[in-house]
């Protein structure tokens, strides 16, 4: 079986996890702050990308009745997070990169208002952040980035960015996330909210959450982080081996987390029959049951992408595996 992408453990995970367990610091502990320092300045580790998005929206003051522009083509997590804070998603089309169509966002805002935009760096490819930041400035929007899939990708930052370290991501903690911002007051607030909004002792001035990352999860993440650059290099090299197929292009600035085949046919059974695990991109969120009544804007292109297929992209993929995958389409 050639899998789509398995977690890859080849570093010091076991040593660090053993150390965390033997230290008796299972919940809070030194690996959490070490993991945060590896992510960068003003990083707050949390227990999932979804909880990170929830907190990021709260930190931006997004709440009941606010409108948040979000792509319809994404994993459902950011859409759910918009609803957790009582806000309304406005579903937007994608472009050929599979990311949010910034031209349609601009067009929408000429006649409509919104309080925030939540772009998703789909499969690790950065959105057109320069345009998004320009639009945000012009129309006074907060920018909450879903970078769950984009750890290690490079692009200009919005007001707040959220990563995921779920098991299928380029590096993992087993489960986890992080909230990052250039503005320390944002990450200070995030840290407060994920820890039950604890000010002093057991005094609480706000409703908080238990979204902290455990020391054990952070220990896995610390070992994984040290291999991030190597992993991006391997993923870039492997993507090039798929060049003879019609693939969605990936820019150099991307971490090359997932590779996507352009197709309008349902090819899943064909690959599975050859022992190859593939996955089609997500069903569109404006068609998901909880969101059927929400606003969506001129969604056209996203319908043409629903059979696009993620091909195997694991770190341990061999050249022979890739030839086998390509062979299915010959
Ligand atoms: C685009 C996107 N957003 C958000 C998430 C949520 O992250 P988590 O699973 O860590 O909650 C994921 C992945 O799982 C994702 O792929």
Image (cartoon, rainbow, N blue to C red):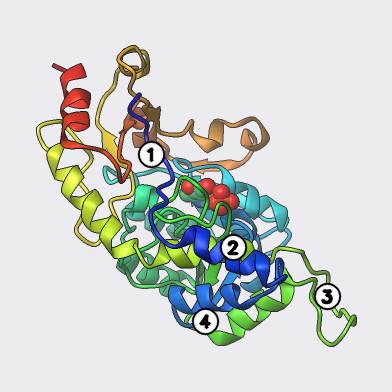
Which comes before the other along the chain, label 2 or label 4? Answer: 2
Question: Which percent across, then down, holds residue 174?
Answer: 55, 52
Q: Is residue 301 left or right of residue 47?
A: left
Please give the name of the residue rendered at 72% of the width and 67% of the height, measured from the top-left corner: 27
Q: Residue under circle 2?
A: 18
Q: What secondary structure is found at the residue carrying circle 2?
A: helix
Question: Which percent across, then down, holds residue 225?
Answer: 41, 65
Labelled pair 2, 4 in contact (Cβ < 8 Å): no
Q: CA distance from mark 2 to mark 4?
A: 27 Å
> Which quadrant holds residue 319?
top left
Ligand 1 is within 8 Å of the C-beta of the residue at disc 3: no
- The C terminus: image quadrant: top left
How many residues crowd mark 2 within 10 Å: few (<14), some (14–19), many (20+)?
A: few
How many residues crowd mark 4 within 10 Å: few (<14), some (14–19), many (20+)?
A: some
Please give the name of the residue rendered at 73% of the width and 59% of the height, measured from the top-left corner: 64
Q: CA distance from mark 2 to mark 3?
A: 36 Å
Q: Residue under circle 4?
A: 42
- The N terminus: image quadrant: top left
């Amino acid at each position: 079986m050639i899998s789509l992408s398995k977690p890859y453990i080849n570093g010091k995970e076991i040593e660090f996890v053993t150390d965390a367990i033997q230290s008796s610091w299972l919940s809070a502990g030194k690996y959490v702050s070490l993991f945060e320092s590896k992510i960068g300045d003003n990083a707050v580790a949390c227990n999932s990308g979804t909880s990170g998005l929830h907190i990021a929206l709260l930190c931006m003051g997004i709440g009941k009745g606010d409108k948040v522009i979000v792509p319809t083509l994404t994993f459902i997590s950011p859409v759910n997070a918009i609803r957790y804070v009582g806000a309304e998603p406005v579903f937007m089309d994608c472009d050929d990169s599979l990311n949010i169509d910034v031209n349609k966002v601009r067009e929408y805002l000429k006649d409509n208002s919104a309080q925030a935009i939540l772009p998703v760096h789909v499969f690790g490819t950065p959105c057109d952040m320069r345009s998004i930041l320009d639009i945000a400035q012009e129309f006074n929007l907060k920018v909450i980035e879903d970078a769950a899939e984009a750890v290690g990708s490079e692009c200009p930052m919005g007001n707040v960015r959220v990563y995921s370290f779920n098991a299928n991501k380029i590096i993992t903690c087993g489960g986890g996330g992080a909230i990052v911002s250039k503005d320390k007051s944002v990450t200070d607030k995030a840290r407060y909210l994920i820890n039950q909004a604890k000010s002093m002792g057991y005094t609480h001035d706000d409703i908080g959450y238990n979204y902290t990352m455990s020391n054990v999860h952070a220990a896995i993440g610390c070992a994984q982080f040290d291999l991030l650059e190597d992993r991006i290099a391997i993923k870039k090299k492997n993507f090039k081996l798929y060049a003879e197929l019609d693939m969605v292009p990936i820019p150099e600035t991307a971490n090359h987390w997932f590779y996507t085949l352009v197709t309008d046919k349902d090819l899943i059974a064909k690959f599975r029959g050859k022992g190859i695990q593939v996955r089609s991109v997500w069903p569109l969120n404006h068609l998901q049951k909880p969101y059927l009544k929400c606003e969506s804007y001129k969604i056209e292109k996203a319908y043409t992408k629903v059979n696009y297929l993620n091909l195997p992209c694991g770190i341990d993929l061999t050249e022979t595996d890739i030839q086998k995958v390509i062979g299915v389409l010959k």
